[in-house]
C-alpha cells in the first residue's frame, strides 16, 4: 500500500506540472514579444485621421485645410504705422491737386520729372534747385509776376522746389534750433513738404524784406497776392485762422499752384485745400 501511495503522488505531481506549463504557454501566446526600444519606435507615428480630436493646446485647422506634417510657427504681425505718422499720398503724386501735408507724404525719393527754371527774379544769385518748379506752375508764376509788375508790385522768389534730402537737412536744423515741437509748427517732415511737389514757392518783395517772416503779411506785396494769386492758379496755402486744419501757422508768402479752376473755388469760398478735397484731419473736425 505504501508503494501505491507513492506512485499516486508522483502521478498527481506530474499532472500539476503539466497543467502549469500549459497555462504559461497560453499566457505567453496572448502577448507579443516586446521589441527592443529604438529611436525610431519610441514615439510611433500616428497616421492623420479626420476623426482625430484636435488637442486643446492647438488651434483647430479650418475645414478642408491641408494638415501640415510639422508644426509651423505663426508669422509675426507686420508692424502698423503709428497714428501720428503720415501715410503715403492717396492718388497720383504728379496731380496738380495732390494733397501733401502732415497726414500725407510723397513716395520715398519722389522727384517731379518736368522741373524747369521760371524766368522770374529771386532774392539770391546763382543756380540752385530752389529756383525750380514744375513746367506748368513755372509758366503760371511768370504770368503772375508780370501781372503784379503792371500793378506796380515787384515780386521775387525766395524758395521753390526742395528735394527730400534738402527738406531733411532743413527740418533737422530747425529742430536743433527750436526743438521738435516748435519746428513742426512751421517746418515739414521730409516727404511731407509741398516744396517737394514742385508746385509751391515762397515769395517776397524784390528787396527780400520780411522774406518768409510774419511781417510779410503787412506788406503791399502780400495784399496783392491775397487778391490776385487765384487768377493765375495759385492759392495762399496756409491762410490765417486755418492752422488747425492745415497744421501750419499763417504763411502769406507760401503759394501753391493748383490750376485756375480749383484756385478760384478755394479762394471764392475762403477754404483750404483740405476742405476742398474733404480731407480735414479728424483732430480739426472734432474742434
Image: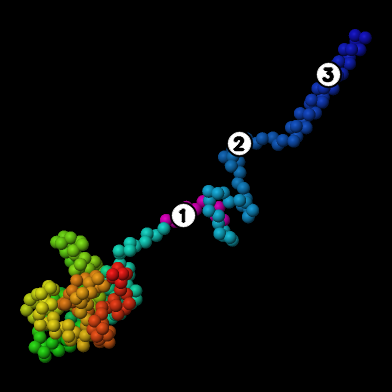
Which residues, given as a range, are shown in magenta?
Answer: 67-76
**Dot 1: what SS?**
loop
Q: Is residue 75 magenta?
A: yes
Residue 154 is situated, as x and y percent measured from the top left of the image, at 9, 84
- Name the residue tied to disc 2: 37
Residue drawn at x 33%, y 63% is 83
Q: Who comes first in sequence, dot 3 or dot 2? A: 3
Residue 7 is situated, as x and y percent measured from the top left of the image, at 89, 14
**Dot 3: what SS?**
helix
Residue 52 is situated, as x and y percent measured from the top left of the image, at 62, 51
Tell whether 50 sits left or right of 183: right
Asked if one can make out residue 177 in the rendered structure from this viewpoint, the answer is yes
Q: Name the quarter where the C terminus is drawn.
A: bottom left
Q: Considering only vertical position in the picture, is 227 above or below 27?
A: below
Q: Name the quarter where the N terminus is drawn.
A: top right
Q: Considering only vertical position in the picture, is 82 above or below 159?
A: above
Residue found at the very far bottom of the displayed protein = 150
- Name the residue tied to disc 1: 74
Q: Nearer the viewer, residue 238 or 31?
A: 238
- Name the residue tied to disc 3: 13
Amino acid at each position: 500500500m505504501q508503494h501505491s501511495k507513492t506512485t499516486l503522488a508522483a502521478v498527481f505531481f506530474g499532472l500539476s506540472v503539466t497543467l502549469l506549463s500549459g497555462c504559461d504557454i497560453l499566457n505567453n501566446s496572448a502577448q507579443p514579444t516586446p521589441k527592443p526600444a529604438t529611436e525610431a519606435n519610441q514615439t510611433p507615428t500616428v497616421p492623420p485621421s479626420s476623426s482625430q480630436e484636435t488637442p486643446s493646446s492647438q488651434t483647430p485647422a479650418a475645414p478642408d485645410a491641408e494638415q501640415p506634417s510639422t508644426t509651423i510657427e505663426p508669422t509675426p504681425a507686420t508692424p502698423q504705422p503709428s497714428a501720428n505718422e503720415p501715410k503715403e499720398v492717396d492718388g497720383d503724386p504728379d496731380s496738380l491737386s495732390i494733397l501733401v501735408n502732415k497726414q500725407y507724404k510723397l513716395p520715398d525719393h519722389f522727384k517731379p520729372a518736368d522741373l524747369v527754371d521760371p524766368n522770374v527774379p529771386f532774392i539770391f544769385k546763382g543756380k540752385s534747385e530752389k529756383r525750380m518748379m514744375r513746367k506748368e506752375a513755372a509758366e503760371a508764376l511768370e504770368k503772375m509776376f508780370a501781372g503784379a509788375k503792371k500793378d506796380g508790385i515787384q515780386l521775387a522768389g525766395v524758395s521753390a522746389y526742395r528735394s527730400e534730402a534738402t527738406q531733411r537737412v532743413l527740418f533737422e536744423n530747425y529742430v536743433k534750433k527750436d526743438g521738435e515741437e516748435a519746428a513742426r509748427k512751421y517746418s515739414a517732415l521730409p516727404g511731407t513738404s509741398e516744396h517737394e511737389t514742385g508746385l509751391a514757392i515762397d515769395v517776397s518783395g524784390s528787396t527780400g524784406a520780411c522774406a518768409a517772416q510774419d511781417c510779410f503779411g503787412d506788406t503791399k506785396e502780400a495784399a496783392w497776392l491775397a487778391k490776385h494769386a487765384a487768377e493765375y492758379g495759385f492759392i495762399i496755402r496756409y491762410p490765417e485762422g486755418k492752422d488747425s486744419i492745415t497744421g501750419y501757422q499763417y504763411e502769406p508768402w507760401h503759394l501753391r499752384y493748383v490750376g485756375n479752376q480749383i484756385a478760384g473755388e478755394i479762394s471764392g469760398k475762403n477754404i483750404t485745400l483740405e476742405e476742398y478735397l474733404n480731407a480735414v484731419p479728424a483732430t480739426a473736425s472734432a474742434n
